[in-house]
Structure formats: C-alpha cells, structure tokens
Image (spheres, helix red, strand yellow):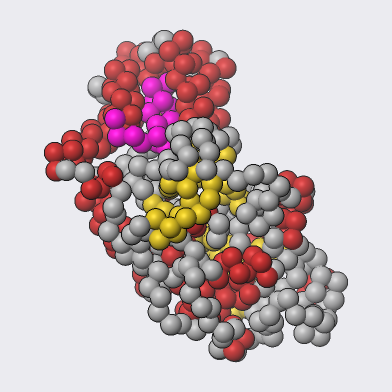
Amino acid sequence: MRVFQTLTGLSVLVASSVLAHEAHHNHDHLAHAEICGQGGSIIPGSETLCGQGVADAVKPQKVILSEPEAEKSPESTNQKNGNNDSQKHPIWEYTTPCFNSSKSKSEICVFSDVDFADGRGTSFVMTESRAAHLAKYPAFTNPELVKNVNQDLKRTIPAKYDMKEFPGKGMGLVATEHIKRGDLIMANTASLIIDYRAFEELTKEEYTQLQAAGVDYLPKAHRDAVLALSTHDGADRTHIERVDKIAATNSFDIDPDEDDEIQDHGFYVLFPEIARMNHDCRPNADYFFDHDTLAQYIHAIRDIFPGEEITLSYINPVMKRKARVDKLQRIWGFQCGCRSCTQDKVRVEASDLRIRRIKELSNELQDWEPQSRANPAMAELMISLYEQEKLWGSLYEAYVFAAIEYNGVGDPWTATKYAGLAVEWGIPVVGPKDEDMVEMAKLAEDPWGHWSWLKRSKVRGGWGKRQRDVVDDD
C-alpha cells in the first residue's frame, strides 16, 4: 500500500484503504486458467508424491531434464559453462523448456540457478529479457546479501517457532518463545517466480509444464520442501497437475519493482516455508517482499506469546465480515474460523460498523478540496478504530493520515510524533524502502519543509489564489 503518489510535481494523499494483501495471495482473476486453490489453510502435507515427472507428460519444445540432481552433461543440459545457451546466460543452469507467446514474438522459458542463495536455488518462468533484468538485482550480483536468509533449509540461528497440528486447520506454526512486535520471524528467497504473462499468453498445458520444470530444477532439499506442500483436497494427480495445484494454493502475488520496465504484469511467487502459515483475519504477523534480495520477510505486528499460533491474513483485512468470509470461501475454499469471523452477531455488527467508518474517514482525509471536512480529530478517530479492530498490520496507515493532517494545519510537533509512529509500525509491514516510509521519514526530519506543511490551511484559505489571479491579470 502506498499513501503517496507524485502528481504534476506535487505529492498528494491518495487512496489507502486497499492493502497490498488485496493483490497478494489472491488469484481469483485467474479463474479462467483453473488454478484457483481450495482448502482450509496453507500447510505442508504428507501425501505420497506422484511419480510422473514433467518430462513424462507432454513433450516440451526443447529437451528438459526431469531429475536435476542427476549427472549432467553439455549435451543433455544447459550448463553454466557448457553450450551456447549457457554462455549467453552465465548464471542459469537451465534455460529450457520454452514456448512461444500467443501475443508476441517472445519466448517464455524456465530460467534456473541452482547456486542462488548459497545453494538454495531459484527458478523463473518468464521471457529472457525479464530474467536478465532480475539477474541484475543485488541478490545475484552480491550473493552475500542472501547467504543466510533461508534459515529453514540451512539454519544458523535458533528458530522462534515450531510446526504442529492445529485442530480443523492442519499444520501450522506455533511460537516457542516470546516474539516481540517488530521482530523478524522468518525470511525466504523465492522458490519459483512466474511472470503473469505466462498465464495470459500460453496455454494451460504449456505454462503448467514450465511450472513443473521450474520446481524439478531446484536442488533436491528445496524441491522436496515445495512438493511436500498440501494440495488440500488429496486428489490423485500427475506430477504436473500436482505442482500446478501446489502453486495455486500457496503462491503470493508480487508487484514489479519500480525499475522494471514491465509494470503491467506482476509475479506469481512461491515460498514453501512461508506457506506453512495459516490465515487469520486479525493476524499477528505480516509480510513484505524485498526486490533487492528477492525475499519475503515476515515480522510480528504485535507481541506473540509462547504456544500461540503465528498467522497471516490472506486477504485485505479492512473488509466487513461477510465480504471476508465470501472471498476466502471463493478463492481458498474454506470457511474462516478465526475469532473475528466467529464472534456473536452483536460484535460482528459493531466490527462491521468500525470498518465502514474507517473507509468513510479514509475518503474524507483524502479530500483536498477547500470544502473538505477533514481535520486532525478525524485522523485520531481513525487511529482508535484501527486499534479497536486490532488491525495492527494496517495501523501505520492511520498514523500516516494523522501526521499529514496535523502538519497540514500547522502542528509540526504532533505531526512529527505520528510520522515517527508510522515509520516504526510500517517498516515491518511494508519495508523501509516503501514510499510511505520515505515520506514519513522526510516529514519527521523537517515538517516545515515537507509538502504537507500548512497544506490543509492553505487549501481552505485559498492561499496562492490571489497571487495567481494577479499574474493572470498581468
């Protein structure tokens, strides 16, 4: 979520009620591709793995090795120092199979680096040019940045959680010690990154082959972790179908970096360790994706106590109960049983009213017209409503609004207080590079020099209008 955008050289407040989670972990727009997931949670399963490899199903256009751990030769694989492909792509162990896009002359291929992140490995499904763009990120150019990120496969520090069975939900993560708000719980580099063009420009037969190949190319321990994820329904499937179902029920949607020239197509990204976390509409943890490291970071958004389950929200939590329940049922196929969704009718109605008021206040605080009713008291009320709703992962948004409102009426000290709170609460949720965090840091450092200084008062008082009129008269 970004509260700010630049419009004709001036930063202005824009809509903030739609969280990053509305897009992330949400694939209902892919219903035509039949990859929407079902089941009650994102958990690892214990089903017997199908034995059919990707090469045993539909033959791809190029040769593909279905058992990456087997002995390789320049004749049978794309090695880093082997054939012509590897010389063009020095970091990729594999650059096939490929399929032609139905909408362009580009090929969409699998690009795999088995040495990425200290041997964890990663696979991309995208065009050659986009893979080359991602290969310029610090995660590839400075391997030390991601050397110890993936603690689940190669642990160097003690875990703060364990995995256990939760009645009615399957496996999940439980805290083994007191985890303080803001603490890092887990981080993982991406296992599989798929450009959404693959879903839109290839047939299902083609893109499911690429998915399966990308998983098959991962180092054995990493591949096993992916294939151990649950498909939730336990149905018998071929290997390709199983990988497709795992990806559909466990992947996150990630927006492209601002430096990516392709802004119209995001990424469909799989993190098997993070996928162990179950859903709660009022979770105690939240996540953000860092493009530099190609990693997802999970932080506590409130104190989590030993024995408590660690949860994420799969959807935008700023929704009324019925909308949340319906969306979870439609996309993931389960009836939400979290405390917020199962409380009595009176409390549900009170909660829904708070959500409605949050959205109303958001609209008011975004209104920069002279007749706007927005004022610091509205921002204070928004903070209280977020707290009452236990929307800890979204609370920083209310602090952003408060900082802008107080600065807009000429109260730099209160504005600085809320800007600091926005940064403190926001970094674990959106990361330090998020535009909101950058703006709030600027405001906290120099409220008088920030674009919002006396902005509300100037708009209402028509400041600057007379000067423009004089210039026009001249």
Residue at image coords 38%, 28%: 398
Q: Where is residue 10 in the image (x, y as percent from the top left)?
A: 48, 29
Q: Quadrant of residue 330?
A: bottom left
Q: In which quarter of the image is residue 111?
A: bottom right
Nearest the viewer among 404 and 234 is 234
Q: In which quarter of the image is residue 395?
A: top left
Magenta stretch, main secondary structure, is: helix
Can residue 227 be seen by looking at this rendering?
yes
Q: In which quarter of the image is the N terminus?
A: top left
Residue at image coords 59%, 79%: 99
Q: Which residue lies most toward the right here?
A: 81
Q: Where is residue 381 in the image (x, y as percent from the top left)?
A: 28, 23
Give the magenta range: 388-404
Nearest the viewer among 221 and 362 is 221
- Asked if the stretch drawn in magenta spans residue 395, the answer is yes
Residue at image coords 43%, 30%: 396
Can residue 6 be seen by looking at this rendering?
no
Residue 408, placed above or below residue 159: above
- Asked if the stretch drawn in magenta spans residue 102, the answer is no
Q: Position of residue 43 (x, y in %)?
A: 46, 61
Residue at image coords 71%, 47%: 156
Q: In which quarter of the image is the C terminus?
A: top left
- Count of marks overlaid on the render: 0
Residue 96, placed above or below residue 383: below
Q: Where is residue 81 in the image (x, y as percent from the top left)?
A: 86, 72
Residue 346, placed above or below residue 74: above
Q: Which residue lies most toward the left here?
A: 346
Image side of residue 250 versus residue 218, left or right: left
